Amino acid sequence: MENPTKEKALPLLLAAVAEVNAMLPAAKRIEERPDTILSGPGGIDSLTLVNLVVELESRIEDEFDLELTLADGIDADQDPFQTVDTLADYVASQLAEAGHG
């Protein structure tokens, strides 16, 4: 991975996915892969997505002592919640913007 901030973000995101998966029945679990679709056709349901975002925000706060609200500042032309990878990119950009890059 070329982006050092993304190297910090992706493990937090995958840990959040694992935590959410622990609460879900097997058929509803999120695949722990960068290309896993999160939103839109073929994505996870909205409640699971909300739980994932809340878990991820909590992990960011614990790891970086930083409160991020990931839904803040999202450009209407950009959907960072498309896949695990796009969400990791978005988290990395937010961390870098907050001086954790």
Image (cartoon, rainbow, N blue to C red):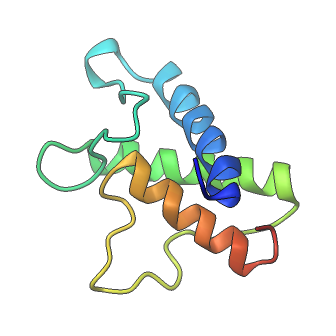
Task: Locate the C terminus and report the quarter of the image it occupies.
Answer: bottom right
> Which residue is at 81% across, 68% downward?
100
Q: Where residue 14 sits: x, y (%)?
A: 55, 35
Residue 91 image point, x, y percent: 58, 63
- Image vertical order of residue 92 relative to residue 15, above or below: below
Question: x%, y% of residue 24?
Answer: 41, 23
Residue lying at the far left in this picture: please name it.
41
- The quarter of the picture where residue 44 lies is top left
Q: Is residue 60 left or right of residue 99?
A: left
- Taking the view exactly as shown, the residue that stands out farthest to the front is 2
Residue at point 35%, 16% (across, down): 25
Q: Residue at x 64, y 38 (%)?
A: 11
Q: Is residue 69 above or below residue 5?
A: below
Residue drawn where x is 55% and y is 69% of the image: 70
Q: Residue furthest right?
A: 65
Residue 82 vs residue 13: left or right? left
Total tally of numbered discs in the picture: 0
| Front residue of this view, candidates 37 and 35 | 35
Estimate the x, y position of residue 31 in percent, counting from the top left.
Answer: 36, 27
Q: Nearer the viewer, residue 79 or 48?
A: 79
Asked where in the image residue 96 lies, by quadrant, the reply is bottom right
User: Which residue is more in the foreground, 72 or 6?
Assistant: 6
Determine whether, in the image, residue 72 is placed left or right of residue 30.
right
Q: Establish if 13 lies above or below 15.
A: below
